[in-house]
Amino acid sequence: MMSLTSVRLGDVVRKQLAFKLKSYAGMFSSLVILQLIAMLFSFGSIAMTGSTRGSLSVSIDYYSADMVIAFTILWIFIHALQLKTRENKDDDGAFITDPLSHNLSNIAFLGIGSVIGGVTALLSSYVLRVIHYFIPGSSPMLHTGLTDHVGEWLAGVAAAICYIFLFSALGYLIGTLIQLHKAYAIILPAVFIGVLVALAQSMDVHVLVMLKDFYFGEPSLLLALSKAIGTAAVLLAGAVMLSNRLEAK
Amino acid sequence: MDILMYTPIILLVVVVVLVWLIGKYVTGRKSGKVQQVPYAKRVKRVVGAYVLLLILSVGVFYLLPDKTGSLAEEQAEAPDHQDPFSLYDAASQGDVSDIDKDYIKEEWEFSTDENAIAITAPDVNQIPIVVEKKQANDDKIEARFYQTEMYAHGASIDVSGYAKPVQIEQTDQELTIIQPDPDEHQVELSAFKQEFPIMQFTNETWMSDDSPLSGEQLLYLQMPEDIKVDDSDAALDYVGELE
């Protein structure tokens, strides 16, 4: 039997989410601007390959929309961080609010941001191709980098959304920690960089490479999504628990 | 011509201005805190216009004619000769009669009554030069330039027409092989790679496995039996002396 409380929680979260979508709408216009800037940077080729046989030489310049995805990840990370650090309690003032509904609406908001960011980032590849095609003097474009099936593209979109959501969860947790104590704004990056350097120098363990392989090197879609969502869930649960502690203070 | 360099910037600025103008046109101006909702609506429309642009670009992309088709008279078909056919293998064993006549792109014949000849090929690279000593002293040097179909990017684009044979010049005691300047026969292509979240689940590698350029060229020289060849300025392979 569904309890009256859970219905109320759902309603409150929905109302808060609707409010956030309106009051933080500027976040999405910044996404558009950031992705356009990333597209501009993507017009430079990321790699070149070539071969010569006698008098004939062929060179192929490679392009990619990876930078748009990277910028989108950066975008959500910063906004997730700001969601907590610049949080104004009056934001949700119009509604009866508690830490749980407040956090849930934030997470739902980040989820929506991740979906919009992921879909637009992967679609931007086609804008790059079309613009590249019409640039006068541009070299003929090979039909490469396209997926054979819509399913493959959708799998990529799902993965991109989950990765973006993962970074939003990380930003949200860090934001919560900073809200707990401002000193974390300095301590966290210092500890992070310190640990990275120490592990690399003393034990030859390259954490970033290991993390990259763990998440982005996973060839199974199901496992890759599970890893990203699982980690995001852990990070968000940590943020919610810290938030509750903060509230109790 | 320098303005071409700025075309991507100009095109993107146009896109940004268009998205901005659409947003401004459909929503009007925002002033004061009271009009927070109209501001949200404006953003919604800007993002909507952006998403529409992205979706349209997918359709436009698939409607664009393939520019690579203009490189060759006809799009490449699978090569007649199944790999691992090799001009070099056939020539180095002296089996030039096995090589398709269509692959002969140029033939030369030089007369010589010298007992010795120097072969120089200062700038020739990636073109094997195979020398066969004939069974007779007919005072004739015969040369043939062979070339298979040349494909760019695996077997997708036939660029055979861009490849030019070497030139051969004869002086009294010297045969000079000259390679045309590669910069004058350059084919430039561009390719997009899959985005990393897609590539993770497909078999595509970071850069294409397909060779940027495939195909073979070879110069085959037939020398009179007793002529002495000075090959100090050229990398020559002799029929029968190869593994």
Image (cartoon, coloured by chain):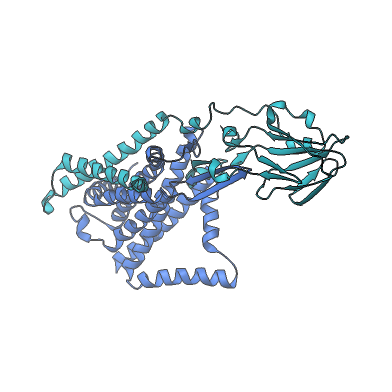
Chain colours: A blue, B cyan
Q: In this rendering, would A122 be left or right of B226?
A: left
Residue B196 position (above or below residue A169): above
Q: Quadrant of the N terminus of chain B?
A: top left
Q: Where is residue B121 in the image (x, y as percent from the top left)?
A: 70, 48
Residue A97: where, in percent of width, then height?
Answer: 24, 55
Q: Give how far across and how far down residue B197 sits, in percent.
A: 48, 46
Circle count: 0
Left or right of B20? Residue B54 is: right
Q: In which quarter of the image is the C terminus of chain B?
A: top right
Left or right of A58? Residue A14 is left
Q: Please tell me which residue lies in front, A182 or B123.
A: B123
Relative to residue A203, is residue A69 depicted above or below? above
Residue at horizontal 31 percent and vertical 43 percent from the top: B11
Relative depth, front residue between B20 and B113? B113
State the residue in front, B200 or B58.
B58
Question: Which quadrant holds residue B126?
Answer: top right
Q: Is residue B41 visible?
A: no
Give the image quarter of residue A157.
top left
The one of B235 and B79 positioned closer to us in this rendering: B235
Residue at (43% x, 48% y) in the render: A162
Q: Can residue B79 be seen in this view?
A: yes
Taking the spot 17% from the left edge, 39% from the top edge, the residue there is B26
Taking the image as shown, residue A136 lies to the left or right of residue B181, namely: left
Q: Residue A174 placed where, x, y %? A: 37, 63
